[in-house]
Amino acid sequence: MKPVKVGICGLGTVGSGSFNILRNNAEEITRRVGRSIVIEQIGARRDNDMCDTTGMNVTRDIFDVVNNPEIDIVLELIGGTSVAKELVLTAIANGKHVVTANKALIAEHGNEIFARAQEQGVIVAFEAAVAGGIPIIKTLREGLSANRIDWLAGIINGTGNFILSEMSEKQRDFDDVLAEAQELGYAEADPTFDVEGIDAAHKLTILASIAFGIPLQFERTYTEGISRITAEDVAFADDLGYAIKHLGIARRSKTGIELRVHPTLISHKQLLANVNGVMNAIMVQGDVVGPTLTYGAGAGALPTGSSVIADVIDVARTLTADPTNRVPHLAFQADALSAVQILPVEEIECGFFLNMTIKDRAGVLANITQILSNNDISIESLIQREREGSELVPLVVMTHDVKERNMNAAIAAIEALPDVAGTVQRIRVENLA
């Protein structure tokens, strides 16, 4: 059969990794597909020293690639959402299949993109958009397709996991570790997308749509970052037998779907609690198979490029297939997506870890426990420690499951007490079982 011709848009980190995998593993890829896959054209604003493009068709206008009639598959690896969206929609209009690593594009505009792709009978593949080299999209969409997914929870941002791991293992402060993460290239100069949970929320939005058969709804994903987590929070959590992880959690309940990204206490006994550094891991609970865990490198040129080229191989294999018999973009048939409600965070129930500073005098603890009781909040455990030479002492409270609405009311009342100094640190607790 004739070669499959690929056009690469973007030659940055992921683009260079994908380029080199296609070149270095060409023989193995041909054996898997049954035909060769060749790079027909590259669109990039500048050259990349990691890629030898000698003798290749390179253009500075990425739209030359999507308008090239010779190209079968376009690799959108430029990032962002505005130009990338235009590029992908143009490729689809031209009847080309698309492979992308762009989680923001899929999470925010995927509904429109997939509808256009279905109209044109082309594929938009996006394995690399979530968790880098971990094949979690294929796992959910194909490997677990016999299951009704009950919930999933994952460490899906390596930067945040590196920061929390360092804070736990070496008792370091957040700002100190963030600075190191930036020096090592794990965090951007502006780390907001990573540390405030936006990157993870994009990925969770995609995972939840595939798991539950719902439209992509990034705007309804509750998002909370880790910038307020202190070394003291981490130490107290450890004393109680928990690790603090920045999790993306999607859970099916009787009243709707929970979609939330936030710092979370999980037991040291849980596998996810022991995923450290920049690694990613996603735990999925299926009604038939039970719990499964996928683990690996969640970013980087070669791990992410691995997922990009795996998608290219999948698309190449289906080029002769009837479009109506392909695996749907979001796992469920497009006309069978569910309109089930996404629950507001105030309706979600979980345990809470509360860390506050109080005056060491009689009656303060009684006032706090009374406020918790008034809001139907049951205490699981409590730690109070003295600070030598200070009338202010830390108080840590762990609660049983309670609605977020009740906890918000209790925290507001506690913070209004004259013997409570500053704000109450609140971190949710999950039992992943």
Image (tube, rainbow, N blue to C red):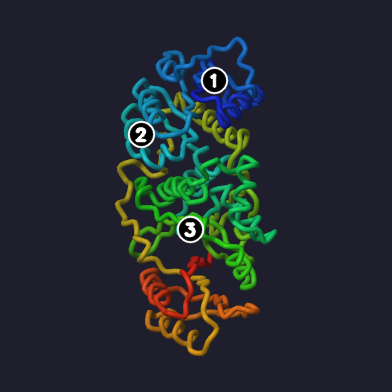
Label 1 environment density (alpha carbons within 10 Å; few <14, some 14–19, many ≥20):
few
Q: Is residue 87 above or below residue 342?
A: above
Horizontal side, residue 274 vs residue 374: left or right: right
**Front disc: 2 or 3:** 3
**Front disc: 1 or 2:** 1
Label 3 environment density (alpha carbons within 10 Å; few <14, some 14–19, many ≥20):
many
Label 2's element? helix
**Front disc: 1 or 3:** 1
User: Which callout, 1 or 2, points at the residue further toward the start of the chain?
Assistant: 1
Label 3's element? strand
Quadrant in the rendering for residue 132:
top right
**Mark 2 is on which residue type?**
Ile
Q: Is residue 190 above or below residue 402?
A: above
Q: Which residue is mark 3?
A: 262
Q: Residue at x 47, y 23 (%)?
A: 73
Q: Residue 43's spot in the image, x, y percent? A: 49, 19
**Mark 3 is on which residue type?**
His
Q: What is the C-alpha distance between the residues marked 1 and 2?
A: 28 Å
* Depth order, front residue of 7/226: 226
**Mark 1 is on which residue type?**
Arg
Q: Which residue is mark 2?
A: 113
